[in-house]
Image (spheres, rainbow, N blue to C red):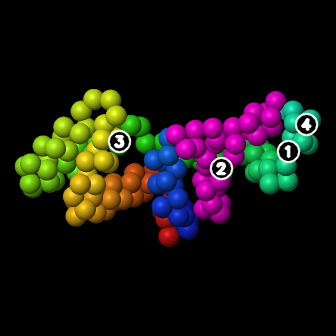
Amino acid sequence: MKRLKVDIDDIAFVMESKDVIEESLTCLDTDTGEVINILASVMEDMEAGNEEAINDYPEWMKEMVEVAEAVLSDNIGRFQEIPKIPSHESYRIMERFISSIADERIRNRLLGAIRGKGSFRRFKDTVREWPEIEKRWHSFKDKAMRKEVLDWLESIGIKPE
């Protein structure tokens, strides 16, 4: 197993950020441990060989083009796309947290909040009603996400330093 210095919080953020980073490719550079993000439009232009569009990119996108080139030419698996946590797994994390709540009244309110469409938003709003429970939720979720990251890193042969 390869030892690599990585930022577990950065990787967890990407795994959780389904909506925020949807229009891009986010990978872990398994040589440097860096999390890289490439706009989908840049990847598409690179794959299509659209030199005209690439030459018109603003300066801040030029480095992204170089990284996209490296990703596209990678045939040894240096760049590993960071997977997104499926919503059903995020839902299970909420359920496990709720089952850990001793106070039946709070537990029942939280269970009600996660039923039906909009469950993530309702859960977040409901848990805020109890600052101590909210603090426990964030700690619980952070531990769960850390485990997701560590499991993924292990699956690609990386042990974080």
Q: Residues within 10 Å of mark 4 (few under 14, many from 20)?
A: few
Question: Residue 60 at x, y = what percent?
Answer: 80, 54
Could you tell me which secondary element the residue under label 4 belongs to? helix
Question: Residue 78 at x, y = what percent?
Answer: 66, 51
Instruction: Give the label, 1 or 4, closer to the camera.
Output: 1
The answer to whether residue 91 is visible is: no
Is residue 79 covered in magenta? no
Could you tell me which secondary element the residue under label 1 belongs to? loop
Give the numbered dot on residue 37: 2
Instruction: Give the label, 2 or 1, closer to the camera.
Output: 1
Q: Find the distance from the CA under tag 4 to the CA under tag 2.
A: 21 Å
Q: Find the distance from the CA under tag 1 to the CA under tag 3.
A: 37 Å
Is residue 31 covered in magenta? yes
Query: Which residue in the protein does label 4 denote?
Result: 51
Q: Amino acid at mark 2?
A: Asn
Q: Residues within 10 Å of mark 3 (few under 14, many from 20)?
A: few
Q: Work out whether residue 63 or residue 152 is closer to the camera in this orientation and state it.
A: 63
Which stretch did the figure color magenta?
19-48
Question: Residue 140 at x, y = what percent?
Answer: 29, 58
Indicate which disc, 2 or 3, sits on the residue closer to the N terminus. Answer: 2
Q: Find the distance from the CA under tag 2 to the CA under tag 3.
A: 27 Å
Q: Residue at x 86, y 33 (%)?
A: 49
Pointer 2 with pointer 3, Cβ within 8 A: no
Q: Residue at x 49, y 53 (%)?
A: 13
Q: Residues within 10 Å of mark 1 (few under 14, many from 20)?
A: few
Query: Which residue in the protein does label 1 denote?
Result: 57
Examine the rendered structure and indicate whether residue 114 appears above or below residue 106. above
- Picture quadrant where residue 91 is located: top left
Indicate which disc, 1 or 3, sits on the residue closer to the N terminus. Answer: 1
Pointer 3 with pointer 4, Cβ within 8 A: no
Instruction: Give the label, 1 or 3, closer to the camera.
Output: 3
Query: Which residue in the protein does label 3 denote?
Result: 121
